[in-house]
Amino acid sequence: MPRIIEDGVGNRYALQNPVELTTAPDDVRLATESEPWKNYWRMLGTVLLAFLILYWGIPTVIIGVLVDEPIVTLIGGVCSILPLPFLFLLHKPKMVHVRLATPDSAGKKYHPLPEGGSLYTSEPTSFSRFLTPDDSILDLPPHRQVWVVFTLTIIVGILATLPLLNEYTETIGILLYLILALPLWVIGFSIPVFAWWATSSKWLGLPTRRRDAEAWLIAGMASALPALMINSFIFPTLMPSSLSASTFNFLMVTISAPIGEETCKLLAVCLFLTAIRSPRHGFQVGFTVGLGFALLENCVYVMGGMFGGPFNITLTTLVRGIGSIPGHAVWTGVSGFAIGCLASETDIHSKIRWRLKKVGIDAVDMVEGWGIDLDGDGDTSGYDQYRETLEEALNSAPEAASPSWMLVDGETGEIHQAQGVEDLTPVGTAMVTATAAAQMRVTDGVHLLPPRNVFAGLGLAMSGHAIWNGSSSLVSHLGPAIGLGSGASLLLDLAWIVVLVATVLTIAKLLMKSIRTMPAS
């Protein structure tokens, strides 16, 4: 009903009410402005807050409880709770208020708006309003651009080391490092993860919602907490006290870390089991979860390197940036690939949804059995609606709809094919000769795919993790054991690190090349 208002001289006016909100159309497609580096700052803020909670707050609470120190427990609780509102602000669900004016000869030129005023159109239009979730695509900068930033960080770290090598410039070098230490730490632990995120997005070629990708990354960060509990509290209590420090440390890096960390990351991937559409999608989820774990872990390691001077932080940033980070991502990607195979080859999505619905129905039955009308239908007879059987749920499972995006030039409106995103051109089916097929296989190169079984994939991930940690530990003890000096031992360590890094990068490239050829859903 129109509102009646009266001006200062007694004139009365009827104001129309704005149109009511309607349901968003199924085929709505919204334009968003490209802001690729905004995701980096959001990711950086997230990991710093997560570091405060997971590596300081919650462990401090546990230690305070174990040693019966209320003050320590209180400090840990404060450090765990204070960052939560800021995390919510960074990742709060965003709704878009869409106002749609469509040319209509029977429409109007003026449309009242809820905040006051009105929308004027030059020709008659019909007007509607609706709310829709912000399903913006993950927008990352070109991967080469991010790798340039990483390379410049390494160069700055090397240049900051040079003045410390000469006693005449040592004081200047110390002052310079005091200025550069914090930026080197922040950029050093975060930029390589962002670079691998951008690289994997291009190589895999799967358009992804930003909120989905950020959820995977955050799940990887969260998986660091149980892994930390296993390494810091559970595993040490299982080891006999008679073990030497060197033996304990070796068992820690070859048994506790691979088993605990890879299991926790696999469980983080399983959180998205009902959303994983294919092995290729599962690898993407696993790779991103691994990056989230590596991001938080890298924050700790590079911080430790920061206190060792510019050479130490630069070496730590380099080795972890091109070795440990893709290692974590690839190992979890292998587990995610197997989860994707499980999801695509079975009806596990429908089974999980049916089980969850059945749990809810059983809860209603139980509560109403106590005489409480939980579903508000006026009786306490339990769940009264139709109870779908598992077979019916499997037969009626809907096909998952893949979201679609377009890359549009902001000035010309021309549609472009996004770099690295698959083109859905139909695959050719023409017959080829055996000779031509053999030549195609040679040209196509080597293909490498992970195991399709979940336990085999997890075992392979644990093995890769254990080989990296164990061989690095053994080589670090090999130099002194065979009588090498400190300089020669350092060169031996660096040489082995080069071998490990080259191996991980080769495996990562072959895996992504092969997985990219698989269906997206």
Image (cartoon, rainbow, N blue to C red):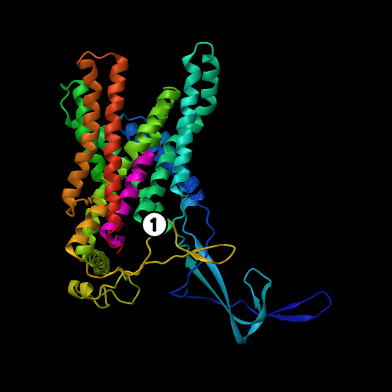
Classify mark 1: residues with Cα within 10 Å, few (<14), some (14-19) or many (20+): some
- Residue 20, compared with residue 493, is above or below; it is below
Between 99 and 496, the one lying in front of the other is 496
Q: Quarter of the image containing the C terminus?
A: bottom left
Magenta run includes residue 283: yes
Between 154 and 224, the one lying in front of the other is 154
Q: What residue do we see at 48% from left, 39% from top?
A: 149
Q: Is residue 455 left or right of residue 213?
A: left
Q: What residue do we see at 30% from left, 76% from top?
A: 379
Magenta highlight range: 270-296
What secondary structure do most residues of the magenta stretch adopt?
helix
Q: Quarter of the image containing the N terminus?
A: bottom right
Extreme residue in the top direction: 167
- Residue 223, compared with residue 438, is above or below; it is above
- Residue 60, compared with residue 512, is above or below; it is above
- Quarter location, residue 380: bottom left
Kind of residue at disc 1: Asp
Residue 75 location (% of width, % of height): 43, 34
- Quarter location, residue 453: bottom left
Between 405 and 416, the one lying in front of the other is 416
Residue 270 visible in the picture: no
